[in-house]
Amino acid sequence: MLRTAMLLIATGLLFASSSSAATVNVDFQGKQWGSGAPVYSGPGVVGTGTVWNAYNFDGPGSETGTARPPAIMFEDNGSTVSTVSVTFANNNAFHFNSLHWGTSLNWAAGYAHLLGDFVDAGGSGKAVTIGGLVPGAGYDLVLFGGRDGNGSSSFNVLSTIKTTTSLNAPHSLTLGVDYVVYTNVIASALGEIPYRFERVHNGLQISAVPIPEPTSILGLLVIGSTLVLRRRSAI
């Protein structure tokens, strides 16, 4: 009986904490000379939706442009408005590129519209802040840094550095080649997650880590405790 009670509690806690979590997808768009890859639509690394928010970088006939965030961010279902924001410390003088997005065979298969244009921070890096989050809550963060050709990008989230090293050959979407993942990153008291990147950055995904429902946990603990007490009384 005791083992059954513990199994019930553990199983219940698992399902109570596995409720769906909101995911926001952002595709950085290099609008060089008014062109660029179409906004990506499709699956990412986290989440179940296929809708991506377009975050534009454009400039008048050059590869240096201004960051233009979307007026409204949507969750990946395309209908729920999100409070999430993405802000660059310096919103101008970006280097971006949209060349060859439609012809290269070296993007991850099916992801040319996501990886085929990017913002490039160079070796000095750029600071980014994801805001509008729940203070103290945990988030899974996917940062895309893929390119066609040889090269690497690095990301620094709360002093943890991860890198992508491009694969100059046809391939599927690959961790460490096209993107890096940070799990359960805790938002600050201001509801923010700051990070820096060097070289290429194509976009990001941020997904709230599911948390147990308090009422579900309480009910399961009461049931489990009752079973344990009955077991002890019968001895």
Image (cartoon, grey):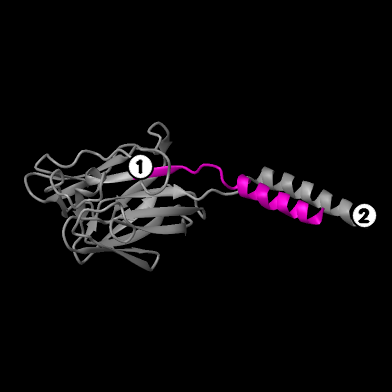
Q: Secondary structure at mark 1?
A: loop
The residue sitting at 68% across, 48% down in the picture is 217
Q: Which of the marked residues, 2 or 1, is nearer the chain's N terminus?
A: 1
Q: Secondary structure at mark 2?
A: helix
The residue sitting at 78% across, 46% down in the picture is 223
Q: Position of residue 44 (x, y in %)?
A: 35, 46
Q: Find the magenta span and give its range.
A: 1-25
Check disc 1: other Cα within 10 Å, few if <14, some if 14-19, many if 20+. Answer: some
Q: Which one is nearer the viewer's eye here, 10 or 170?
A: 170
Direction from residue 219 to residue 92 in the image, left or right: left
Does the magenta portion include 54?
no
- Measured in 3D between alpha carbons, the distance from the residue under mark 2 to the one under mark 1, in whole angstroms, is 54 Å
Q: Main secondary structure of the magenta part?
A: helix
Q: Which mark is residue 190?
A: none
Query: Which residue is labeled 1 in the image?
Result: 43
Q: Quadrant of residue 37?
A: top left
Query: Which residue is labeled 2 in the image?
Result: 233
Direction from residue 104 to residue 133 in the image, left or right: right
Relative vertical location of residue 13 with respect to residue 175 in this rendering, above or below = above
Asked whether disc 2 touches disc 1, contact meaning CB atoms under 8 Å apart, the reply is: no
Q: Quadrant of residue 152?
A: bottom left
Q: Position of residue 215 (x, y in %)?
A: 68, 43
Direction from residue 224 to residue 164 in the image, left or right: left
Three-letter amino acid code of the residue under disc 2: Ser
Residue that extends furthest to the left in the rendered view of this protein: 61
